[in-house]
Image: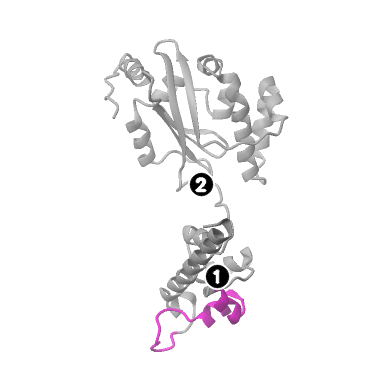
C-alpha cells in the first residue's frame, strides 16, 4: 500500500471514529443535563444534533457534517464549544481534537505539589533503585533514599537542573557529565517553550547562568531537545561504576510533573553493586531486585 493509500485509509478510519464518538457522546446526555426542558418521550436517546448545534453556536448543517465525518475545516474554538456542550472532560476533549485532526490543547501545568501517598509508596517500593519526581520547573518534589545516595543529592538540592550544574559531588560522580550537559540544557529550554507565559523558567536559567559558566555557554546556543530515555553512568566512590537506564513518565494527575525511574543496565554488574551499597548503610537490609 502506497503512502497516499495509507494516508487515505487513516483519514477514513479517523472520520469513522469521529462520527461514532460524537454520536455516542450526544446520546449519553439528557436535555436536562444541558439546561434544556424535557420534551416528553423521544424516539432516540440523548440530545438531537440540532440541539447540540444551537447550544454550541454553530450551524445545524455544519454540525451534521462534523458528526458525519465529512472533510470540513474545523477550528479549535468550535471544537471547544462542542466539547463544552457535550460535557467532555479533559481526556475526552483531547480525544475529540485528535479525531478531528488537530493537536489537543496542552493541559495547564499543575503547581508544585508534594508527591501523593501513592506516588511516594511507588518511590519507596522502587528501592533499591533510584527514583525521583520533578515538577515542570525541574524542582524535586520527592526523591527516594537510593537516588540521594547514588547521585549525591543532599538537603540543598532542590532543582534537578541547578544540581546538575552546581553540585560538585554529582558532577564528580557522573561519568559523562561533559557529553550529557548540552542535552540537559537543551531539555530545559524545550520544556520552557511549552510554557511561554511562565517567567520562572527565565528566572531559573538567569540565576544558574550567573553562577555556572558552562550552563551560560550552553544556554546561549538556544538548542532544544526532548529525551524520555537516557543512560546514566555513575562512578560511585563506594560501589564503583553504576550504569542505569533512566526513563521519564508523566504524572497524569499533576500535568508538568514527571516520574524518573532508573533501572540497572543489562550487561553490567550494577544490580549487584547497588544491592551491596544499599545494604551497607545503617538499617540497609535491602530487598532483592526483581
Label 2 vs label 1, nearer the camera: 1
Please, what secondary structure does the residue beneath circle 2 have? loop
Is residue 42 shown in magenta?
yes
Q: Where are the magenta residues, as a range?
A: 38-66
- Crowding near pointer 1: few (<14 within 10 Å), some, many (20+)? many
Which residue in the protein does label 2 denote?
Answer: 255
Instruction: Identify the mark at residue 82; answer none if there is no mark.
Output: 1
Q: Which residue sits at x=68%, y=34%? A: 223
Extreme residue toward the right, this view: 220
* Image location (x, y in percent) of residue 192: 63, 40
* Image location (x, y in percent) of residue 228: 51, 37
Q: Does the image show residue 131? A: yes
Residue 132, quarter of picture: top left
How far separated are the C-alphas under marks 2 and 1?
Answer: 24 Å
Please, what secondary structure does the residue beneath circle 1 have? helix
* Image location (x, y in percent) of residue 221: 72, 30
* Image location (x, y in percent) of residue 226: 58, 38
Is residue 46 shown in magenta?
yes
Query: Which one is nearer the viewer's eye here, 51 or 202?
Result: 51
Amino acid at each position: 500500500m502506497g503512502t497516499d493509500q495509507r494516508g487515505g485509509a487513516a483519514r477514513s478510519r479517523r472520520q469513522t471514529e469521529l462520527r461514532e464518538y460524537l454520536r455516542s457522546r450526544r446520546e449519553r446526555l439528557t436535555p436536562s443535563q444541558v439546561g434544556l426542558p424535557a420534551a416528553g418521550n423521544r424516539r432516540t436517546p440523548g440530545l438531537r444534533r440540532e440541539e447540540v448545534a444551537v447550544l454550541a453556536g454553530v450551524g445545524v448543517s455544519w454540525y451534521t457534517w462534523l458528526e458525519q465525518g465529512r472533510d470540513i475545516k474545523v477550528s479549535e474554538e468550535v471544537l471547544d464549544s462542542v466539547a463544552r456542550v457535550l460535557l467532555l472532560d479533559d481526556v475526552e476533549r483531547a480525544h475529540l481534537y485528535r479525531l478531528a485532526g488537530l493537536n489537543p490543547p496542552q493541559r495547564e501545568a499543575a503547581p508544585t505539589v508534594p508527591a501523593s501517598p501513592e506516588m511516594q509508596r511507588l518511590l519507596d517500593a522502587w528501592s533499591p533503585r533510584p527514583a525521583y519526581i520533578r515538577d515542570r520547573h525541574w524542582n524535586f518534589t520527592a526523591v527516594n533514599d537510593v537516588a540521594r545516595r547514588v547521585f549525591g543529592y543532599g538537603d540543598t538540592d532542590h532543582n534537578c537542573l541547578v544540581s546538575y550544574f552546581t553540585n560538585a559531588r554529582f558532577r564528580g560522580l557522573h561519568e559523562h557529565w561533559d557529553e550529557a550537559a548540552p542535552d540537559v540544557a537543551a531539555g530545559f529550554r524545550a520544556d520552557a517553550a511549552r510554557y511561554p507565559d511562565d517567567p520562572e523558567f527565565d528566572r531559573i536559567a538567569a540565576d544558574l547562568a550567573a553562577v555556572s559558566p558552562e550552563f551560560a555557554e550552553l544556554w546561549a546556543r538556544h538548542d532544544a531537545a526532548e529525551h524520555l530515555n537516557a543512560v546514566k553512568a555513575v562512578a560511585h566512590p563506594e560501589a564503583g561504576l553504576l550504569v542505569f537506564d533512566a526513563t521519564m513518565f508523566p504524572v497524569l494527575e499533576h500535568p508538568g510533573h514527571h516520574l524518573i525511574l532508573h533501572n540497572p543496565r543489562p550487561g553490567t554488574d550494577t544490580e549487584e553493586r547497588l544491592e551491596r551499597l544499599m545494604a551497607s548503610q545503617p538499617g540497609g537490609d535491602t530487598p532483592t531486585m526483581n
